[in-house]
Image (cartoon, rainbow, N blue to C red):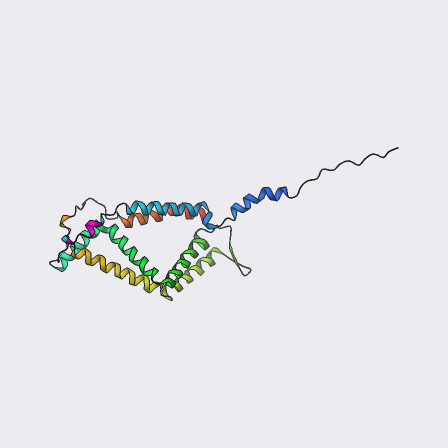
């Protein structure tokens, strides 16, 4: 009499479970540059800068040599600077930004230090998820320790390298050019809006950029 065949046991594939869970783990460990929070931050900054630059005055008015004249007194020069700044503030700050950028480009080591500093703040603190601590040489750093190290690194870059002197020198050159143009540019032909709030223009859209980008940073840290 033939013996009965043993029952067939079900065989499960142990690799199916990890493969199903792999996408979620990869999404949670995606690089900071690919996170939605960082992309939203860049998009909001770009939109705000574009909106601010759209408020600039025609460059032909800024470079109109026929409107240049010597101020009668120091008080007249100060009044001209105030009126011209109210009218050309976006153009002035764009020129100052270009001067700072040119100064950094001509000092590549300072530019490299500054980019490293900005990248450290963005990817090690602002856009690093709070559930992914920094581990270095087998030691885990808390958020407070990371913040302290970044502050010390910022002090080192700004005060113990050429970055601080390059930035200060460029800003002083920009301010000097703005004051010189504002003092010698007669504002009589400019149509100034007396009802315009004092906080409009380039500075206001920078503040708007910071406020609009704050939710993206909070979402990344959450």
Q: Nearer the viewer, residue 216 or 44?
A: 44
Residue 16 locus on image (x, y percent):
63, 41
Which residue is at a point 28% across and 53% down the rendered structure image? 94
Q: Position of residue 2 (x, y in %)?
A: 86, 33
Near-viewer residue (131 or 45): 45
Instruction: Please give the count of numbered marks on the rendered protein.
Output: 0
Of all residues shown, which one is farthest toward the right?
Answer: 1
10 lies left or right of 104: right
State yes or no: residue 60 in magenta: yes
User: For the N terminus, which image quadrant?
Assistant: top right
Residue 62 seen in this snapshot: yes
In screen coordinates, is 108 left or right of 175? Answer: right
Residue at the (24%, 53%) spot, across then down: 92
Q: Name the residue at the top extreme.
A: 1
| Position of 166 relative to 42 (above/below) | below
Label the magenta part by its dominant secondary structure: helix
Give the answer, above or below, for where 72 lies relative to 31: below
Q: Is residue 76 magenta?
A: no
State the residue in front, 47 or 145.
Answer: 47
- In this rendering, does residue 222 appear at all? no
Q: Position of residue 130 (x, y in %)?
A: 48, 51
Q: Magenta part of the protein: which range?
A: 59-65
Query: Viewed as shown, does residue 97 lie left or right of 19?
Result: left
Q: Position of residue 215 (x, y in %)?
A: 40, 45
Q: Residue furthest left?
A: 72
């Amino acid at each position: 009499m033939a013996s009965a065949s043993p029952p067939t046991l079900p065989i499960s594939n142990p690799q199916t479970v990890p493969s199903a869970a792999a996408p979620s783990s990869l999404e949670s460990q995606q690089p900071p540059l690919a996170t939605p929070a960082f992309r939203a931050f860049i998009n909001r900054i770009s939109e705000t800068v574009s909106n601010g630059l759209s408020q600039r005055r025609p460059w032909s008015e800024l470079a109109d040599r026929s409107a240049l004249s010597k101020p009668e007194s120091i008080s007249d020069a100060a009044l001209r600077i105030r009126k011209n700044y109210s009218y050309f503030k976006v153009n002035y700050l764009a020129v100052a930004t270009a001067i700072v950028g040119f100064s950094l480009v001509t000092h590549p080591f300072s530019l490299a230090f500054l980019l490293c500093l900005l990248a450290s703040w963005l990817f090690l603190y602002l856009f690093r998820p709070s559930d992914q601590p920094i581990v270095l040489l087998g030691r885990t750093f808390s958020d407070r320790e990371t913040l302290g190290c970044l502050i010390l690194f910022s002090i080192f870059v700004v005060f113990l390298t050429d970055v601080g002197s390059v930035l200060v020198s460029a800003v002083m050159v920009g301010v000097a050019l703005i004051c010189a143009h504002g003092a010698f540019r007669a504002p009589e032909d400019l149509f100034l809006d007396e009802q315009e709030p004092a906080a409009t223009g380039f500075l206001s859209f920078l503040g708007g950029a910071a406020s609009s980008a704050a939710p993206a940073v909070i979402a990344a840290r959450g």
